[in-house]
Amino acid sequence: MKPWKSSSANAQAGVSRRALLIAGAVAGGGLLLGVAATRAPSAQTRLGDPADFAPTDSQVALNAWIKIERDGRVIVAVPRSEMGQGVRTALAMLVAEELDADWSRVSVEHAQGARAYANAALLLNVLPVSGDDDSLLARLSRGTVQRLGYALSLQVTGGSSSVRDAWEPMRLAGATARALLVDAAARRWSVDAKACTVEQGVVLHAESGRRADFGELAAEAAALEPRGEVALKPASAYRLIGKPVPRQDIPAKVDGTAVFGIDVRPEGLRYAAIRQCPVFGGRVAAFDEQATRKRRGVSDVFVLGDTAVVVLADSYWRARSALDALEIRWDEGPNAQLDSAQIRAQLKAALDGEGGFGFRSEGDAPAALKQAGAKPIEAVYEAPFLAHAALEPINCTALFEDGVLTLWCSTQVPVLARWKAADVAGIEMERVTLHVPYLGGGFGRRLETDMAEQAAAIALRSPGRPVKLVWSREEDMQHDMYRPVAMARFAALLGDKGLPEAWVNRVAAPSVSLATTERLLPKMASDMPDKNQIEGAFDLPYAIPQLSVQQLRVKTPVPVGSWRSVGHSYNAFFTEGFIDELAHAAGQDPFAYRRALLAEKPRHRAVLELAATKAGWGQALPAGRARGIALHESFGSWCAQVAEVSLEQGEPRVHRVVCALDCGIVVNPDTVAAQLESAIVYGLSAALYGEITIKGGRVEQGNFPSQEVVRMAQMPKIEVHIVPSSAPPGGVGEPGTPPIAPAVANALFVLTGKRLRRLPLRAADLAA
């Protein structure tokens, strides 16, 4: 791999080998002891260079975040990918609030790579500290990784970090631009700037009755320097933040004009269909291309790397049909006999063995469990591999012409995608242009760059003609970077009052951080402890005097990656299932039991109480129904859910989900509610049906008939309740996913008396 060459994004970022090595340590799950090479960015630096936003002749850029048209319309730079989470609206609201812009005249553009757009908050997700840990070490750690993320220009949409990261810089950009516009008006009118106000995109001087809109003042404002620090609005003055503002992307998605990656059709487009070796680690052995080349519309047939065959044609249907008719002989390699049972045995062997990395140790819990007369409660929980199964299949369009590569790619990592595509094409990164359309779902799958790399390689064979690579649904499901399989073993000792006095938890799973680093930044991969694997287990909020949580790394040939809420997605099921077991073993109410263990966790306790109250916890239900409760902290937010469940023809049926969330201050409550509803149904589909199984070294599932999801007729009623807060924003896109599986499983136990410790929650396991 060639070194990362300087570009418009990375030259400004000042990316050094030292900084990249530090990033590799972070990505590998390591702890940062110090980052002397990175400095906290100043407020002015985070405003960026106006040139970063590339204004046209009719526009004036006041900083890297704001452009103003001559007619006064405001354009906001949004450096995060829109994949249904409403980020284009939420981030624009931050700017418009402080700018006092007319919201009806605010639009957005996707920002290209620049240091000002770095997602400094993203790396907070690798810290082995909980969200409410305010210790000096925790605060220093947070500051360090934020500075590092900024230094590396990490322009990533993921980790529920978009609003968390933008909260300060985008409000500051709006407030600074507002101050410049007011200063320009005051100078023009020879009045005191303090006597001027701003309303709906117009600067006013009440005493003289003069007024000027932003378009009139923009050029003069751009020539001025900010006068010292600007003050941000108090929450009491918010006009947009906290209000249900209509989303920017909805009209285009309703009328069909929204452009997703799969909709891009440059003139002269050719289509590429791909088939990759179905066995992990396998290769192409041979194929007969002669008959395929004679098919109508086919222009090329070739091996990509040594693991896939590609057919290029003038339509996707012709490319796909030709590929389906092509007989390919595979060298299945060393993993041809791999199956799910072997992987399960591998996880169990890891739990049975010695060692493991201790992520948390308080007291001597293992010794307490072995003391004379101790009768520990024990359990083993399991979770399967999961596919992302985004509605928009993997695709990327590429054009290589005159040494320049242009990509249209629905990606969560635009800077990294440019870099990896440039490496494939053998050109400098600044010779790669990337357009980011709407994403038809991401869920972590589009944090990968394989589609951009493949499209770049295919485009090199067709210079001067754009090519669109489209994966079939089967390719998408059988060549994913899956949510890891995981297994956890618990043992706990209850005290006289039935509360746990000792807790031991060992979690065995593949490492997402290591696997991702090996794929994307192989020279930086290191076999270090991985916080992503153990998150949601080591940061258990309950007050238990003696506690031990260990991580065991297990490597399999199945590629793994980030899946919505990452390790929280299975560790919440494990920990909230087991704490529920302890409550029932103690003969206590599960809600009251949790509440008693949260005396020193006010935010956890408040969200738990809100969910229970709104769900009517303790009140009678119709015959044949039961409630289950679960609580989980992730991505700087606290979420509790109560699921109301029954059995219909022996199958679990979820009728109602009551969700309470504390995510700090809320930018757009409608978006928060929609995100939680999305997270719940996504997690519920996984809890009831989701499973990727391996046989003969390959994935058995191929399409939605074998990978069921919750249908409209099965959709429960979802009620969302948001805890009022003035704390800084937490994440929203992912925290709603982890609690749903344990809430449903806990309800099924109340209903049937059978404890399901393995996902998905199958009727067959209830009947066993």
Image (cartoon, rainbow, N blue to C red):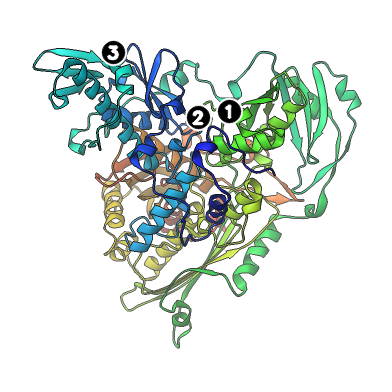
693 vs 405: above or below: below
User: Label 3 is placed on what type of residue?
Assistant: Glu
Identify the element where label 2 is drawn: loop
Residue, disc 2: 112
429 vs 515: above or below: above
Eye-nearest disc, 3 or 1: 3
Q: Is residue 594 visible?
A: yes
Q: Nearer the viewer, residue 733 or 8?
A: 8
Residue 691 lies left or right of residue 52; in this view the side is: right
Residue, disc 1: 434
Sequence-earlier tag: 3 or 1: 3
Sequence-earlier tag: 3 or 2: 2
Residue 160 lies left or right of residue 662; in this view the side is: right
**x and y percentages locating residue 75 in the rendered image:** 38, 21
Residue, disc 3: 216
Quadrant, the N terminus: top right
Eye-nearest disc, 3 or 2: 3
Q: Is residue 747 visible?
A: no
**x and y percentages locating residue 586 in the rendered image:** 36, 71
User: Label 1 is placed on what type of residue?
Assistant: Leu
Identify the element where label 3 is drawn: helix
